[in-house]
Image (cartoon, helix red, strand yellow):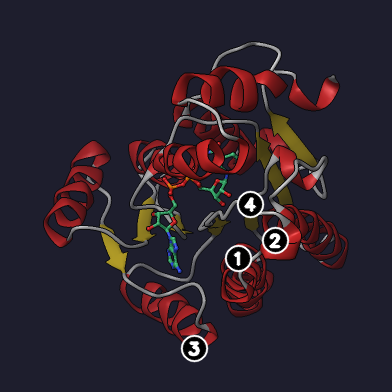
Amino acid sequence: TLAGKTALITGSTSGIGLAYARALAAEGVSVMINGFGDADAIEAERAALEALAGAPARYSDADMSRPDEIAAMVARCTDELGAPDIVISNAGIQHVAPVSAFPVDKWDAILAINLSSTFHLIRAALPAMQARGWGRIIATASAHSLVASPNKSAYVAAKHGLAGLIKTVALEVAQAGITANCISPGYVWTPLVEKQIPDTMATRGLTRDQVINDVLLAAQPTKQFVTPEQVAALALFLCGDGAASITGANLTVDGGWTAA
Ligand code: NAD
């Protein structure tokens, strides 16, 4: 059972991260959520997480582009909830533009938030996992950690890098009772996907329906968006003892996208 353990989940005020937090809190896991958004909405969500099974929930506003804030978040989690047994690196942003016109500040931000934050998080959280001989590290990668799409150079580069980082960590801790894996969703209906529709409409000269059906779901053989709850179900499984031998894996939840 996972009850009594502590999980730190980045980028969990919305979308997939929030679904991870709900799935773990429902099992009695103490959770520290993180991300941006409306303060009242975040506080309501934090309280709702505590109500699921009675385990404490905390919120950190640490910015995943800031290594110092990531270290401080891990320290605060350790003080208030206990050293994280489970870390899920999930915060991520997207920007859609051709490589020759890709804004340099967007490149830097995507590499920092989608890739480097995972290094800083693991670096800070791993020693306590090694000391207790148990840990679960999960990164939300993407089908874009395995295949590319045009106009997403920074995102595809960051997600491919994330897959390499997680494989390396898995090898380093393979005998320490700690697993490290990527979960790679296809298109999941979350604010991150909704927000890229206008840019893709502009870049490719398409209507909203054309972007949804001919661009986003074109690659997904099921022709349906993945749900955040389906992604969270895999994370919950990876946290269990039944998944103790699954490490260094990059597991897709992509409606068949990368099989095509
Ligand atoms: P989302 O936009 O709903 O959630 C992103 C979360 O990250 C939010 O909580 C946001 O506040 C937080 N965040 C953004 N910048 C941050 C920063 N600098 N510091 C701290 N938190 C920050 O997006 P989502 O779709 O749930 O995406 C979650 C993860 O899943 C991302 O890594 C994304 O790349 C990945 N992913 C999403 C899809 C999809 O189709 N939605 C597919 C594959 C992978």
Is ligand 1 less than 8 Å from the beta carbon at label 3?
no
Instruction: Tell me, for residue 154, which label it has, or none.
Output: 2
Q: Can you identify the residue that label 1 sits on?
A: 110
Residue 147 in which image quadrant: top right
Q: Nearer the viewer, residue 80 or 253?
A: 253
Height in image: 149 above or below 138? above
Of the residues tagged 3 and 4, which is closer to the observer?
3
Q: Secondary structure at mark 4?
A: strand
Instruction: Tell me, for residue 10, which label it has, or none.
Output: none
Q: Can you identify the residue that label 4 sits on?
A: 138
Q: Residue furthest bottom?
A: 68
> What's the residue at 88%, 61% (across, down)?
171
Cα distance between the residues tagged 1 and 2: 6 Å
Q: Is residue 257 left or right of residue 135?
A: right
Instruction: Tell me, for residue 68, which label it has, or none.
Output: 3
> What's the residue at 55%, 40% (across, down)?
200
Q: Secondary structure at mark 2?
A: helix
Query: Who comes first in sequence, dot 1 or dot 2?
Result: 1
Query: Who comes first in sequence, dot 1 or dot 4?
Result: 1
Q: Residue furthest top?
A: 222
Cα distance between the residues tagged 1 and 4: 19 Å
Q: Residues within 10 Å of mark 2 (few under 14, many from 20)?
A: many
